[in-house]
Image (cartoon, grey):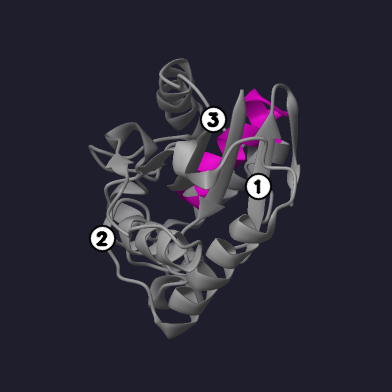
Amino acid sequence: MLLYVIRHGQTDYNLEERLQGSRDIPLNDTGRGQATANGRTLAAIGDLEFPLSQFDWVSSPLGRTRETMELVRQAAGLEPGGYRTDPLLIELSFGDWEGETLDEVAAHSRDLIEQREGGKWDFRPPGERAESYALLAKRIDTFLTTLAGPTICVAHGGVIRTLFNRIGKVPGDDAAMIDIPQDRVLKIKDDAIGWV
């Protein structure tokens, strides 16, 4: 397996530390700059093993990931629209908490925040569509079985945390706490995982 993964660029929700989840929030100007810089980083990698044009390019279907993908591809010298989307890569849903900050959630659900802090990997917020990291990891397991060759992927922080668990063997609760930058490229080769 050869997989390069990029988190979407910053959104205003990221800036405000709001739980974004599956909401379709657009990039802000900082996020657009991060995406462009990540495209330049990919283009400058000297040991890619394959030309960028030979990679399978895949994105979460949410707008912030698609815009990131298009800016990455353009900065790397490729046609912006030459990629596919996969709904398996959508960020985990925070259910009823989406749009709120953790401080706002704590004001009405302190007991649930305490439960979350006691085991973030398996914690599922309230709401019909809400997911835990453990549930998201099952989707990512399925996504990984679909990879047929070298791939470049634009996804979300939660998705990348599950990759650290699944491929890097980081324990779930530890993986769920990893800070995932929006201005770096992650390289996964076989069972090795690390930032470029």
Answer above or below: position of 96 versus 108. Answer: above
In the image, taking residue 66 as reference, residue 133 lies left or right, namely right
In the image, taking residue 80 as reference, residue 170 lies left or right, namely right
Image location of residue 107, percent across then percent down? 44, 68
Q: Is residue 77 magenta?
A: no
Element at label 2: loop
How packed mark 2 is, by other alpha carbons closer than 10 Å (few <14, some 14-19, many 20 or more), is few
Residue highlighted by disc 1? 186
Q: Distance between the residues labelled 1 and 2?
A: 23 Å
Q: How far apart are marks 1 and 3 (CA)?
A: 14 Å
What amino acid is at disc 3?
Pro
- Give me the disc on residue 24: 2
Write the start and end of the magenta stretch as one range: 155-173
Q: Which residue is drawn at 62% across and 42% down?
A: 176
Q: Residue at x 41, y 57 (%)?
A: 78
Q: Can residue 61 be seen in this view?
A: yes
* Front one among 129 and 42: 42
Lower sequence index among marks 1 and 2? 2
